[in-house]
Each structure stands twice: as structure tokens, then as C-alpha cells.
């Protein structure tokens, strides 16, 4: 069976190593059939960026989401039924309107890595600032097989 690491390697990516959460929270929390993945930021300290640069940061944050997912299922992708929802938060100046362009960086990576199981509903929201001065933060809700 192909692992998530194998799929990402074929796309030119590697899963990042997860550090400890930055505060008093968990990287993920499982409930009956569901996995909530806490917001994962792109590169700290970048703040608002152009839409294309922020799209790349959304991909970085999505890689971290996938690293949390992989850890949560112990590398067993068969446990992932589908990604139900992504929340993409973008540090944006007033008047910024390319939220969907930025969020596509995360969405496209999840679909490329997980196939149909990566297709999801999504919210893309502009905010004044994000933790650690990041440009993008991505959270996820995933349906798991028992």
C-alpha cells in the first residue's frame, strides 16, 4: 500500500516533523469517526503576502495538517475516509479579495495527496493577524473509518 510519504514524495514534498503545540492545546482530537486537526501555520513571521506567495504558504500549512493526520492514524491511510472541511485563515490587508486563490494552495495539495478522499468543503477567511506572524493557518475536519 502506498503511504502518504510516498504520495507526497511523488509530488516533490516531504512531511514536516511535528514539534510540540505552541500553547495548551492538542495537534488533533478524535471523536467517534471524526478527527479535528488544530490550525497549522505556514512559515512564522511573514505576515500579509501577495496572493501567490500566500498560496505557497497555504501549501506549507497543509503539509503540516497532513503530518498531523499521518501521526493521528499511525501512517494507516486506509483509516482516512475523507476530508470533510478545511478552514483557511489568511492574514490580509483591507481590500484583499483573493482568499480563494490562497486557499487553493491547501486544497490542491490535499486532493493531490489523498485523491477523492481529499476533496472537501472549505471556508477561506481574511484576518488581521495570525499566530507567530504567519501569513496562513489551515485547520481540518476528517472522517475516519473505525
Image (cartoon, grey):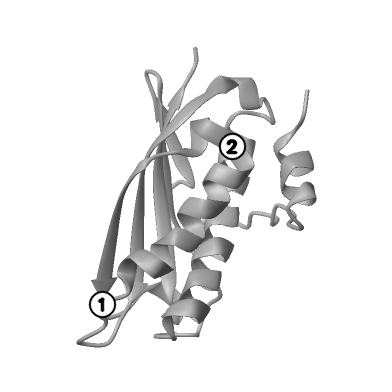
Q: Which residue is mark 2?
A: 114
In-front residue for pair 27/141: 141
Residue contact at pointers 2 and 1, CB within 8 angstroms: no
Which quarter of the figure is the N terminus placed in? top right
Q: Residue furthest left?
A: 94
- Residue occupying the point 56% across, 75% down: 43
Image coordinates for residue 31, horizontal then vertical, percent? 37, 24
Q: Secondary structure at mark 2?
A: helix
In-front residue for pair 30/98: 98
Q: Which residue is mark 1?
A: 97
- Residue occupying the point 49% across, 85% down: 46
Q: Is 110 placed left or right of 96 in the picture?
A: right
Q: Quadrant of residue 99?
A: bottom left
Q: Is 85 placed left or right of 72 in the picture?
A: left
- Residue occupying the point 55% across, 71% down: 56
- Residue occupying the point 70% across, 52% down: 15
Image coordinates for residue 92, horizontal then vertical, percent? 30, 81
Q: Quadrant of residue 5?
A: top right
Image coordinates for residue 60, horizontal then vertical, percent? 58, 64
Q: Secondary structure at mark 1?
A: loop
Q: Is 87 placed left or right of 94 in the picture?
A: right
Q: Earlier in the sequence, mark 2 or mark 1?
A: 1
Q: Quadrant of residue 33?
A: top left
Q: Is residue 100 above or below residue 134?
A: above
Q: Is residue 84 above or below residue 24?
A: above
| Crowding near the residue tagged with mark 1, few <14, some 14–19, many ≥20 C-alpha atoms within 10 Å | few
Q: Is residue 58 above or below residue 25?
A: below
Amino acid at each position: 500500500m502506498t503511504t502518504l510519504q510516498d504520495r507526497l514524495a511523488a509530488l516533490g514534498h516531504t512531511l514536516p516533523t511535528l514539534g510540540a503545540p505552541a500553547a495548551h492545546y492538542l495537534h488533533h482530537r478524535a471523536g467517534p469517526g471524526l478527527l479535528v486537526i488544530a490550525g497549522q501555520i505556514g512559515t512564522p513571521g511573514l505576515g500579509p503576502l501577495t496572493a501567490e506567495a500566500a498560496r505557497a504558504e497555504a501549501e506549507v500549512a497543509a503539509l503540516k495538517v497532513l503530518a498531523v493526520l499521518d501521526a493521528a492514524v499511525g501512517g494507516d491511510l486506509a483509516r482516512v475516509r475523507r476530508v470533510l472541511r478545511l478552514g483557511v485563515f489568511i492574514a490580509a490587508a483591507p481590500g484583499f479579495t483573493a482568499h480563494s486563490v490562497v486557499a487553493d494552495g491547501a486544497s490542491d495539495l490535499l486532493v493531490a495527496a489523498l485523491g477523492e478522499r481529499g476533496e472537501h468543503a472549505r471556508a477561506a477567511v481574511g484576518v488581521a493577524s495570525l499566530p507567530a506572524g504567519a501569513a496562513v493557518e489551515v485547520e481540518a475536519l476528517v472522517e475516519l473509518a473505525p
